[in-house]
């Protein structure tokens, strides 16, 4: 699992969000060399059934499939992991209780209280050894939480103390909205708040992630030791490619 290996080796990882419903797009992302893909079930049209095939497509090319669920909900988190996502990403975490709820839903006992079913893809539809499945799943499942609101910022210290969270993901868009400058992800007060989270999370030994849309921003956050770098969205990348090609062809 590429992302987990990189984290263990203190290396950064880069991957886009995906809102496409076609497994071929996920394969292209993997073939291009990205480390992970965030299959988005918060925004965009995809359902859990579609996501299962997108997860399969990612694994064909050693691309780590992460699922962003729609909300902090036990059933959504366990379904995402049951279909074989190697990590779950949960939006709008505002306090310690929210963060603990994510860990409880994502990890089996003794780390949490994830609902148990072996007849799912993650457990090889019951072909995996019972004990091994629980152990392997607890060791290898990445738990990623979004800090993307004023409340999350206020409670950052207690959130960071929750055990079992692997990555703190700062959502610049929702954060900009909650700070009164919607969409201005490069506004100094947003960037300042983000930098404070990076500093605190690094102090608590957590990996930090964020979403960027330009190589320059990726470099800025990478230089600040942000190691889970989510770069753009597949449909946006495709739109840019189409629009550049069309502009070039039109000039002929
Ligand atoms: C945000 O920016 O709010 C996200 O969730 C990721 O783009
Ligand atoms: Mg968000």
Image: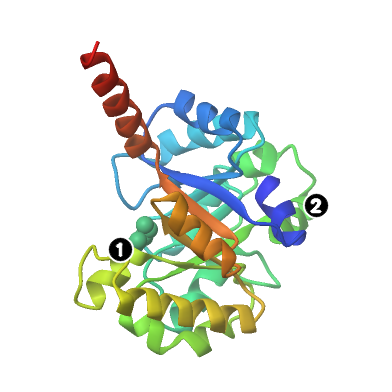
* Residue 24: % across, % down: 47, 23
Vertical side of 88 occupied by 145: above or below: below
Left or right: where does residue 119 sit relative to residue 66? right
* Disc with the residue nearer the chain's start (2 vs 1): 2
Q: Cβ(mark 1) to ligand 1 < 8 Å? A: yes
Closer to us: 248 or 120:
248
Query: Distance of mark 2 from mark 1, alpha carbons?
Result: 39 Å
Q: Residue 87, image x and y in percent?
A: 58, 54
Badge 2 is on which residue? 132
- Asked if one can make out residue 143 in the rendered structure from this viewpoint, the answer is yes
Q: Position of residue 80 (x, y in %)?
A: 50, 49
Could you tell me which secondary element the residue under label 2 belongs to?
Answer: helix
Identify the image quadrant of the C terminus: top left
**Which quarter of the frame holds ligand 1?**
bottom left
Residue 148 vertical position relative to residue 61 in the rendered view, above or below:
below
Residue for point 27% across, 14% down: 249
Q: Residues within 10 Å of mark 2 (few under 14, many from 20)?
A: few
| Label placed on residue 134 | none
Q: Quadrant of residue 123?
A: top right
State the residue position of label 1: 173
Residue 56, quarter of the rendered image: top right
Identify which residue, 150 or 202, lies in the foreground.
202
Q: In front: 184, or 78? A: 184
Residue at screen point 62% across, 74% down: 206
């Amino acid at each position: 699992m590429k992302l987990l290996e990189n984290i263990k080796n203190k290396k950064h990882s880069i991957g886009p969000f995906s809102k496409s419903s076609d497994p071929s797009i996920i394969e292209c992302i993997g073939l291009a060399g990205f480390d992970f893909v965030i299959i988005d079930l918060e925004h965009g049209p995809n359902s859990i059934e579609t996501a299962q095939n997108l997860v399969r497509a990612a694994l064909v090319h050693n691309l780590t499939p992460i699922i962003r669920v729609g909300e902090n909900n036990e059933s959504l988190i366990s379904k995402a992991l049951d279909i074989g996502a190697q990590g779950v990403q949960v939006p709008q975490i505002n306090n310690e209780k929210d963060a603990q709820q994510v860990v409880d839903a994502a990890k089996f006992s003794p780390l949490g209280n994830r609902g148990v079913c072996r007849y799912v893809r993650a457990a090889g539809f019951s072909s995996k050894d019972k004990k091994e499945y629980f152990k392997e799943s607890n060791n290898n499942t990445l738990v990623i939480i979004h800090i993307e609101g004023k409340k999350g910022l206020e409670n950052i210290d207690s959130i960071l103390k929750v055990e079992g969270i692997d990555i703190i993901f700062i959502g610049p868009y929702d954060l900009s909205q909650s700070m009164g400058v919607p969409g201005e992800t490069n506004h100094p007060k947003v960037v300042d708040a983000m930098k404070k989270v990076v500093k605190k999370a690094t102090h608590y030994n957590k990996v930090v992630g964020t979403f960027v849309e330009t190589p320059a921003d990726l470099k800025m956050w990478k230089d600040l030791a942000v190691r889970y770098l989510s770069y753009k969205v597949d449909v946006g990348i495709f739109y840019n490619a189409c629009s550049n090609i069309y502009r070039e062809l039109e000039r002929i």
